[in-house]
Image (cartoon, grey):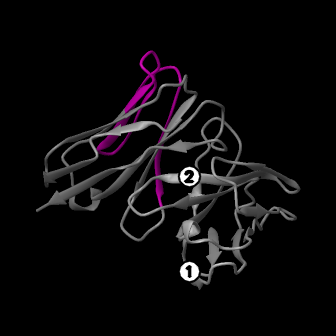
Amino acid sequence: NAGVTQTPKFRILKIGQSMTLQCTQDMNHNYMYWYRQDPGMGLKLIYYSVGAGITDKGEVPNGYNVSRSTTEDFPLRLELAAPSQTSVYFCASGWTGRNTEAFFGQGTRLTVV
Amino acid sequence: QQPVQSPQAVILREGEDAVINCSSSKALYSVHWYRQKHGEAPVFLMILLKGGEQKGHEKISASFNEKKQQSSLYLTASQLSYSGTYFCGTSTVQGAQKLVFGQGTRLTINP
Protein backbone atom coordinates (compact mmCIF):
# COMPACT_ATOMS: atom_id res chain seq x y z
CA ASN A 1 0.00 0.00 0.00
CA ALA A 2 1.95 3.02 -1.30
CA GLY A 3 -0.59 5.74 -0.39
CA VAL A 4 -0.20 8.90 -2.49
CA THR A 5 2.70 8.88 -4.95
CA GLN A 6 3.98 11.97 -6.73
CA THR A 7 6.49 12.20 -9.54
CA PRO A 8 8.90 13.78 -10.13
CA LYS A 9 10.32 14.78 -6.73
CA PHE A 10 12.33 17.66 -8.18
CA ARG A 11 12.21 19.55 -11.45
CA ILE A 12 13.75 22.66 -12.94
CA LEU A 13 11.82 24.31 -15.77
CA LYS A 14 12.69 27.20 -18.01
CA ILE A 15 10.23 30.06 -18.37
CA GLY A 16 7.60 29.17 -20.96
CA GLN A 17 8.08 25.42 -20.75
CA SER A 18 5.27 23.06 -19.84
CA MET A 19 5.14 19.97 -17.69
CA THR A 20 2.81 17.57 -15.97
CA LEU A 21 3.09 16.65 -12.31
CA GLN A 22 1.87 13.12 -11.76
CA CYS A 23 -0.16 11.96 -8.76
CA THR A 24 -1.60 8.53 -8.11
CA GLN A 25 -3.25 7.01 -5.04
CA ASP A 26 -4.04 3.39 -4.25
CA MET A 27 -6.52 3.90 -1.40
CA ASN A 28 -9.62 4.16 -3.62
CA HIS A 29 -10.27 7.68 -2.36
CA ASN A 30 -12.84 9.65 -4.28
CA TYR A 31 -11.45 13.08 -3.37
CA MET A 32 -8.11 14.30 -4.68
CA TYR A 33 -6.43 17.70 -4.30
CA TRP A 34 -3.50 19.73 -5.52
CA TYR A 35 -1.89 22.27 -3.21
CA ARG A 36 1.10 24.53 -3.60
CA GLN A 37 3.26 25.68 -0.72
CA ASP A 38 5.53 28.68 -1.09
CA PRO A 39 8.55 28.99 1.24
CA GLY A 40 7.50 29.64 4.83
CA MET A 41 3.85 29.75 3.91
CA GLY A 42 0.77 27.60 4.27
CA LEU A 43 -0.87 25.42 1.66
CA LYS A 44 -3.02 26.92 -1.06
CA LEU A 45 -5.55 24.82 -2.96
CA ILE A 46 -5.09 24.83 -6.73
CA TYR A 47 -7.69 22.31 -7.91
CA TYR A 48 -9.64 19.46 -6.44
CA SER A 49 -11.71 16.55 -7.72
CA VAL A 50 -14.64 14.78 -6.08
CA GLY A 51 -14.46 11.81 -8.44
CA ALA A 52 -13.47 10.63 -11.89
CA GLY A 53 -14.51 13.16 -14.51
CA ILE A 54 -15.27 15.93 -11.98
CA THR A 55 -12.86 18.73 -11.14
CA ASP A 56 -13.20 22.19 -9.65
CA LYS A 57 -11.04 25.24 -9.01
CA GLY A 58 -9.50 26.08 -5.68
CA GLU A 59 -7.98 29.35 -4.46
CA VAL A 60 -5.15 29.69 -7.02
CA PRO A 61 -6.04 27.86 -10.28
CA ASN A 62 -4.57 30.31 -12.81
CA GLY A 63 -1.78 28.81 -14.91
CA TYR A 64 -2.75 25.22 -14.12
CA ASN A 65 -5.01 22.54 -15.52
CA VAL A 66 -6.11 19.18 -14.20
CA SER A 67 -7.95 16.10 -15.36
CA ARG A 68 -9.33 13.07 -13.56
CA SER A 69 -9.97 10.22 -15.93
CA THR A 70 -9.60 7.51 -13.28
CA THR A 71 -10.11 7.25 -9.52
CA GLU A 72 -6.38 6.70 -9.01
CA ASP A 73 -4.77 9.46 -11.05
CA PHE A 74 -4.95 13.24 -10.83
CA PRO A 75 -2.25 14.91 -12.95
CA LEU A 76 -1.54 18.65 -12.73
CA ARG A 77 -0.52 20.42 -15.93
CA LEU A 78 1.53 23.62 -15.97
CA GLU A 79 1.36 25.52 -19.24
CA LEU A 80 3.85 28.30 -19.98
CA ALA A 81 5.75 28.08 -16.70
CA ALA A 82 6.47 31.35 -14.90
CA PRO A 83 8.85 32.14 -11.99
CA SER A 84 5.78 32.73 -9.79
CA GLN A 85 5.04 29.02 -10.08
CA THR A 86 8.25 28.12 -8.25
CA SER A 87 6.91 26.22 -5.26
CA VAL A 88 6.47 22.83 -3.65
CA TYR A 89 3.42 21.03 -4.97
CA PHE A 90 1.53 18.52 -2.85
CA CYS A 91 -1.08 16.11 -4.04
CA ALA A 92 -3.51 14.69 -1.48
CA SER A 93 -6.49 12.36 -1.39
CA GLY A 94 -9.32 11.45 0.96
CA TRP A 95 -12.87 10.15 1.32
CA THR A 96 -16.08 12.10 1.60
CA GLY A 97 -17.75 12.31 4.96
CA ARG A 98 -17.79 14.36 8.13
CA ASN A 99 -14.45 13.24 9.50
CA THR A 100 -12.49 13.00 6.31
CA GLU A 101 -8.77 13.65 6.46
CA ALA A 102 -6.38 14.30 3.62
CA PHE A 103 -3.42 12.01 2.96
CA PHE A 104 -0.53 13.85 1.35
CA GLY A 105 2.12 12.76 -1.09
CA GLN A 106 5.77 13.65 -0.52
CA GLY A 107 5.68 16.68 -2.77
CA THR A 108 7.30 17.92 -5.98
CA ARG A 109 9.78 20.78 -5.66
CA LEU A 110 9.52 22.87 -8.82
CA THR A 111 11.86 25.71 -9.77
CA VAL A 112 11.15 27.91 -12.78
CA VAL A 113 14.17 29.87 -14.05
CA GLN B 1 -10.35 33.96 3.73
CA GLN B 2 -7.24 32.53 5.34
CA PRO B 3 -7.49 31.67 9.06
CA VAL B 4 -5.02 33.40 11.36
CA GLN B 5 -2.72 31.33 13.53
CA SER B 6 -0.93 32.50 16.64
CA PRO B 7 1.76 32.51 17.67
CA GLN B 8 3.82 32.40 14.47
CA ALA B 9 6.64 30.62 16.25
CA VAL B 10 7.34 29.19 19.68
CA ILE B 11 10.41 27.67 21.28
CA LEU B 12 10.03 25.30 24.20
CA ARG B 13 12.10 23.00 26.32
CA GLU B 14 11.18 19.35 26.35
CA GLY B 15 8.36 18.72 28.82
CA GLU B 16 6.80 22.18 28.55
CA ASP B 17 3.29 22.83 27.27
CA ALA B 18 2.19 24.80 24.22
CA VAL B 19 -1.04 26.22 22.85
CA ILE B 20 -1.54 27.13 19.20
CA ASN B 21 -4.58 29.12 18.17
CA CYS B 22 -6.47 29.32 14.89
CA SER B 23 -9.10 31.99 14.26
CA SER B 24 -11.45 32.53 11.36
CA SER B 25 -13.79 35.34 10.39
CA LYS B 26 -16.19 32.87 8.76
CA ALA B 27 -18.70 30.43 10.24
CA LEU B 28 -16.88 27.12 10.20
CA TYR B 29 -18.04 23.57 9.78
CA SER B 30 -14.70 22.05 10.76
CA VAL B 31 -11.11 22.71 11.69
CA HIS B 32 -8.36 20.31 10.61
CA TRP B 33 -4.93 20.22 12.23
CA TYR B 34 -1.79 19.02 10.46
CA ARG B 35 1.88 18.86 11.41
CA GLN B 36 4.65 19.21 8.87
CA LYS B 37 8.29 18.44 9.54
CA HIS B 38 10.92 20.21 7.47
CA GLY B 39 11.07 18.85 3.92
CA GLU B 40 8.22 16.42 4.49
CA ALA B 41 4.52 16.21 3.69
CA PRO B 42 1.88 17.42 6.15
CA VAL B 43 0.53 14.71 8.42
CA PHE B 44 -3.01 14.69 9.76
CA LEU B 45 -3.48 15.15 13.52
CA MET B 46 -7.20 15.62 14.09
CA ILE B 47 -10.48 17.15 12.97
CA LEU B 48 -12.77 19.31 15.07
CA LEU B 49 -16.38 19.62 13.96
CA LYS B 50 -18.83 22.38 14.80
CA GLY B 51 -20.57 21.65 18.04
CA GLY B 52 -17.61 22.50 20.25
CA GLU B 53 -16.05 19.06 20.19
CA GLN B 54 -12.79 18.51 21.96
CA LYS B 55 -10.63 15.71 20.74
CA GLY B 56 -7.40 14.28 21.93
CA HIS B 57 -4.63 12.02 20.86
CA GLU B 58 -2.15 11.02 23.55
CA LYS B 59 -0.65 14.31 24.72
CA ILE B 60 -2.07 16.41 21.89
CA SER B 61 -5.63 17.66 22.15
CA ALA B 62 -7.72 20.39 20.56
CA SER B 63 -10.91 22.33 21.05
CA PHE B 64 -13.27 24.22 18.77
CA ASN B 65 -15.21 27.21 20.02
CA GLU B 66 -18.04 27.59 17.54
CA LYS B 67 -19.17 30.97 18.91
CA LYS B 68 -15.74 32.49 18.44
CA GLN B 69 -14.85 30.47 15.30
CA GLN B 70 -11.61 29.62 17.02
CA SER B 71 -9.74 26.39 17.55
CA SER B 72 -6.85 25.73 19.89
CA LEU B 73 -4.31 22.93 19.75
CA TYR B 74 -2.82 21.86 23.10
CA LEU B 75 0.51 20.06 23.30
CA THR B 76 1.15 18.74 26.79
CA ALA B 77 4.56 17.73 28.11
CA SER B 78 6.10 18.31 24.69
CA GLN B 79 8.52 15.81 23.23
CA LEU B 80 11.35 16.41 20.78
CA SER B 81 9.27 14.66 18.11
CA TYR B 82 6.63 17.40 18.35
CA SER B 83 8.91 19.85 16.58
CA GLY B 84 7.60 21.03 13.24
CA THR B 85 5.18 23.48 11.72
CA TYR B 86 1.54 23.16 12.69
CA PHE B 87 -1.17 24.19 10.27
CA CYS B 88 -4.86 24.59 10.81
CA GLY B 89 -7.15 24.14 7.84
CA THR B 90 -10.68 25.47 8.06
CA SER B 91 -13.76 24.53 6.10
CA THR B 92 -17.20 26.09 5.83
CA VAL B 93 -18.65 22.91 4.33
CA GLN B 94 -18.63 19.22 5.21
CA GLY B 95 -15.50 17.45 4.02
CA ALA B 96 -11.99 18.59 3.19
CA GLN B 97 -12.48 19.70 -0.40
CA LYS B 98 -12.46 23.39 0.40
CA LEU B 99 -9.88 23.58 3.17
CA VAL B 100 -8.18 26.95 3.63
CA PHE B 101 -4.95 26.71 5.58
CA GLY B 102 -3.40 29.18 7.99
CA GLN B 103 0.16 30.38 7.61
CA GLY B 104 1.49 27.92 10.15
CA THR B 105 3.06 27.96 13.61
CA ARG B 106 6.65 26.80 13.86
CA LEU B 107 7.25 24.81 17.04
CA THR B 108 10.80 24.09 18.18
CA ILE B 109 11.40 21.75 21.09
CA ASN B 110 14.85 21.85 22.65
CA PRO B 111 16.30 19.21 25.00
What residue is shown at x 47% (from left), y 19% (from top)?
B66
The foreground one among B54 and A79 is A79
Asked whether residue B48 is drawn in magenta, I would say yes
Residue B52 is left or right of residue A36, and the answer is left
Residue A18 is left or right of residue A107, and the answer is right
Q: Give the x, y percent position of residue B84.
A: 32, 59
Q: Which residue is mark 1?
A: A9
Amino acid bearing label 2: Lys
Which label was assigned to residue B94? none
Task: Work out whether A98 lies above or below B43.
Answer: above
Q: Which residue is mark 2?
A: A44
The foreground one among A95 and B87 is B87
Considering the numbered disc 2 on the image, is that residue within a helix, a strand or a loop?
strand
Asked whether residue B45 is drawn in magenta, I would say yes
Decide: few, some or many residues near mark 2? Use Cα within 10 Å; few <14, some 14-19, many ≥20. many
State which tag comes first along the sequence, 2 or 1. 1
The foreground one among A73 and A61 is A61
Quarter of the image for residue B63 reads: top left
Position of the C terminus of chain A, as image quadrant, is bottom right
The foreground one among A94 and A61 is A61
Marks 2 and 1, Cα distance to the nearest angstrom?
19 Å
Considering the numbered disc 1 on the image, is that residue within a helix, a strand or a loop?
loop
**Is most of the magenta stretch helix, strand or loop?**
strand
| Tag 1 subunit | A
The segment highlighted magenta reads B42-71
Q: Give the x, y percent position of residue A52.
A: 86, 57
**Do the CB atoms of the residues marked 2 and 1 lie less than 8 Å apart?**
no
Task: Work out whether A7 lies above or below A86.
Answer: below
Decide: few, some or many residues near mark 1? Use Cα within 10 Å; few <14, some 14-19, many ≥20. some
